[in-house]
Image (cartoon, rainbow, N blue to C red):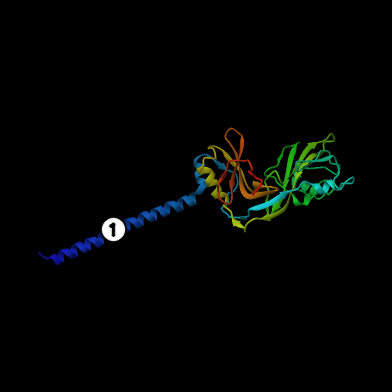
Amino acid sequence: MDFRKIEWIFFLVFIGLNIFLFSIYWNNQHEQSLVTNSNQREDIIHRLGNDDIEVKGQVSDKQQEGYYLSAEQDTFDSLLNEGANPTIKGNWSISDKVLTNSYPNADTEFDLKKSTSSFNRLMKNKEFIMDGEEYTYMPDISKKDDELGKIIGAQSYEGIPFIDETSRVTLDIVKSDDDQERVSKYTQTRLKEIEPLREKMTLYSEKEILNTLYINNNIPSKSTITNIYLGYFRTLEVREKNVYVPVWFVKIKTSDKTTQIEKVNALNNQVITNNLVPKVENP
């Protein structure tokens, strides 16, 4: 018996078997890669569609940048210190860091059909409001119809607004007897000493946070995602300072016509489920 020949036969079979097994492994890996890439191309929009979830407008995969921020809420002491001749005219008061002007005496005409220009005009009037030039009209969170409106503005940091009660102007719009739309009242909160706590960081994109909401069952089937917007949101209060992080807000209209707003931390892609702000008195 030619053992040498048999050894060569087994050797060649062994080599062939290894080549065969390696080809199967490579094909499997390639197929997995194709599935992954296919899912990425198909991405969240297709999966939402499979659940009869409609998305209004385009969903971006662009990754913006943002910060951890700290800021202190203004108590409006400077206005109180103006004494008998305050800059702002009207029946105003300050309570718990909120400035309320119930009957502003300045020109308060407002055109709900031209909300941006009307808002900007009022914010420039120093007899109407303090530091109004710091605020930008926020259509995503404002409410209006043909006769009434709550027009909201907010401060911003490097182009990203604060979507938070601590930095907000809310104008109550009503129709007066002469059929003219006017501001009947406004409230104002303001942040000062805004500064980053860390270097600028890359944020998760709209598509990525929608995927997170989807896999966590936060988007009901047969609903409509009407809007997605980014803003700084308070997550912690340390003595007199607040800590803010960039958050994606997703407005959803459910099949029963109710509206829910989901929030996702844009820095770590985690769903925010608790609106309570922890307080740290002695860090």
In the drawing, does residue 89 fall left or right of residue 70?
right
The one of 75 and 154 positioned closer to us in this rendering: 75
Residue 145 to residue 43: above or below: above
Q: At 79% from the left edge and 50% from the top edge, which residue is drawn? A: 131
In the image, farthest residue toward the left:
1
| Residue 219 location, quadrant | top right
Residue 167 to residue 259: above or below: below
| Residue 255 location, quadrant | top right
Q: At 23% from the left edge and 61% from the top edge, which residue is drawn? A: 14
User: Residue 64 appears at what percent x and percent y?
Assistant: 60, 55
In the image, farthest residue toward the right:
84
Quick one: label 1, few (<14), some, or many (20+) residues within 10 Å? few
Q: What element carries label 1?
A: helix
The one of 223 and 211 positioned closer to us in this rendering: 211
In the image, farthest residue toward the bottom:
4
The one of 155 and 234 positioned closer to us in this rendering: 234
Which residue was labeled with disc 1?
Answer: 20
In the drawing, does residue 11 fall left or right of residue 162?
left
Q: At 62% from the left edge and 50% from the top edge, which residue is drawn? A: 246
> Can residue 158 be seen by looking at this rendering?
no
Q: At 63% from the left edge and 50% from the top edge, which residue is drawn? A: 245
User: Residue 67 appears at what percent x and percent y?
Assistant: 63, 54
User: Residue 25 appears at what percent x and percent y?
Assistant: 34, 56
| Residue 113 location, quadrant | top right
Q: Identify which amino acid the numbered label 1 is placed on.
A: Phe
In the drawing, does residue 223 fall left or right of residue 163?
left
Q: Quadrant of the N terminus?
A: bottom left
How many marks overall? 1
> Can residue 90 be seen by looking at this rendering?
yes
In the image, farthest residue toward the top:
256
User: Residue 11 appears at what percent x and percent y?
Assistant: 21, 63
